[in-house]
Amino acid sequence: MKVTFKSWDQRYKSPFGAIQANTEVTWSVKVEEEIQEVTLWLTKVNEDAVAYPLSYNSDTEMYETSVKIGSSGLYYYYFNVKQNDQYYFLQRSQDGFGDGEITQDNTDLRTFQLTCYDRTVPQAPWYTRGVVYQIFPDRFNNGNPNGEITGRKKDSFIYATKKDSPYYIKDEQGDIARWDFFGGNLEGIRQKIPYLKQLGVTAIYLNPIFLASSNHRYDTQDFLQIDPMLGTEEDFKKLVHDLHQNKIALILDGVFNHVGADSKYFLEAINDKNSKYFSWFNFIHYPDKYQSWWGVTTLPEVNKHNKDYQDFICGPKGVLAKWTRMHVDGWRLDVADELPMQMLREIRERLQNEDCHVLIGEVWEDASHKFVNSEFRTYMAGDNLTGTMNYPIRNFIIDLLQAKNEEDELSALNDLEKLVENYPKAFLENCMNNIGTHDTPRIKTVLGGDEDLVSLAFGLLFSVPGVPCIYYGDEAGLEGDKDPDNRRYFPWGEESQLLERKVARLASLRKQNPALVNGKVGFVKIAFGINALVRYNQKEVVVYCYNKTDQDVILDAGEFQTYCLPEEIAELVSDILDQESLLKKSDMHKTFLIAKK
């Protein structure tokens, strides 16, 4: 039986992708044989499935039904087709870019996803149109005279040279006994603003900067104090001022799930049951056993449902208010999965009150269908996060560049298509995309030290939907395996000229071509190791085509396979790429004007 359905094609499902509540969705299925009936089975998470019969439309020669989706949430659907009193099931194809696939086995059906949200998240133009640069403050630059280091910490050491490899000194129990520092600080970041501008950076995202014992500072001691090793509150204000003078925004890291065991809050709680901080923590056996983040005893977990704690973070005189009023432009939330949804909404409300509209959550998976302890996390609803750290994009880029055959490449491209389909458009465009962070091995190390491949990875990063975020040093060719090796000091004076020039050029292209910001996405499969991403809007088409092979090629439109592209766009892209020369391990961007207004 030949049955056709394509979830990305508006002839079969309209509108495309995620929808807003109270939107009517039309599904159409083409069946090229005589049948008895077609039925849509639509299920909202935690609710029973509902059947919607499809009616035959003689004009379109397809079976159709329209359903108004009244409430936001996560929906799944599939179709069944009845022929000769037998039932067939139309599920999502494994690697078919939203194509349907017929089966008679209804166990473990691969259903299609429909994301429904309450309201569109805000988009701050400085952010969505920009380029973000992530800085691990201790490892970027020391701006003090002669590299002096202030605010030295107990039980720590300073490296002899900036080329030393990061290293943990651990005790008999495997806990870190001595923290290591290079001495990077806020003044050092301020002094490198010209470098950031030259790269095309328009926003920086700083790992935590508040008082803590460690070099990463995710073990906060005091949320209201800048770590003295990084500088003073005046240094912070000076940095913000100079960044803004140079049209660079600032995003801070909010670590509100846990604190350090040596924090002022926890120390007072374990020494005084009458302390106002006692109720902030969940003690199993007071005072020595308590709930901690993933069992790490140096990171006591905070009771995030505690009203006093929520007010401390989100209140009008709280942590968010204090720093945001110093003209902080956005926030990234550490382990957003472990913060209650209600607290995420309060954080968002506080930031809105402070005229701050960028709230990015750390979520490692596809955030549209994320569950925590069997609870569906409503990140897409529109009332909490405005975007996430888009680790699936990193997976896509690495999978595509490390693919062993065309099937692997198609699988990677299909993963990107599913992400585009699952996320509301504005939310996806707000996501902070990366090819590396302080929690992952460096992209150059992952790609075997091959800077040509790293260059292609940057090209892909700047070509997909979302905001590109560069992890400090990746553009300089810095290498490093997993933590702590991925947190080396920036190699000033020994940067990769190839990669720095590439990033600056990509940043310029993103600024010049709005389709790279707001365009829809499609794909061109040419040959193994040779693929193209297409971004298009009503005015322009931008094509990023790369060749990761060791052979120069002449592109031949007769070999192209296009996916997720309207016919007229596919033809335009094929015509313009046809007979183009593409050197080995190289790429090209092409822009075409398709309409004038």
Image (cartoon, rainbow, N blue to C red):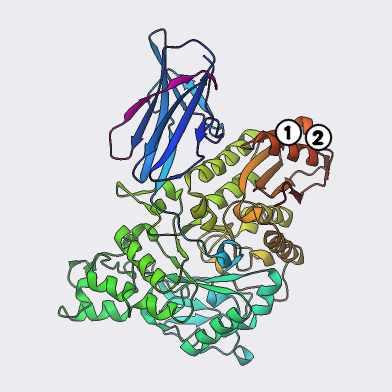
Secondary structure, mark 2, is loop
Identify whether 525 is placed above or below 199: above
User: Residue at coordinates 52% horizontally, 66% vertically from top-left?
Assistant: 484
Residue 456 in magenta stretch: no
Mark 1 residue element: loop
Determine which quarter of the picture holds residue 261: bottom left
The kind of residue on which mark 2 rests is Asp
Q: Describe residue 577's horizontal placement relative to residue 102 as left or right.
A: right
Q: Position of residue 538 (x, y in %)?
A: 65, 48
> Mark 1 highlights which residue?
560
Q: x, y percentage for residue 565? A: 64, 37
Picture quadrant where residue 44 is located: top left
Which amino acid type is shown beneath numbered disc 1? Phe
Q: How far, Cα to Cα, is label 2 from label 1?
A: 7 Å
Mark 2 and mark 1 in contact? Answer it, CB < 8 Å: yes
Outermost top residue: 84
Instruction: From the viewer's side, name the closer residue of 429 and 123.
Output: 123
- The outermost residue toward the left is 274
Residue at coordinates 56% horizontally, 73% vertically from top-left? 249
- To which residue does mark 2 refer? 556
Give the residue at x 42% y 64%.
Answer: 334
Left or right: 20 in relation to 8: left
Q: Position of residue 366 (x, y in %)?
A: 46, 48
Nearest the camera: 404 or 232?
Answer: 232
Residue range corresponding to the magenta coloring: 45-61
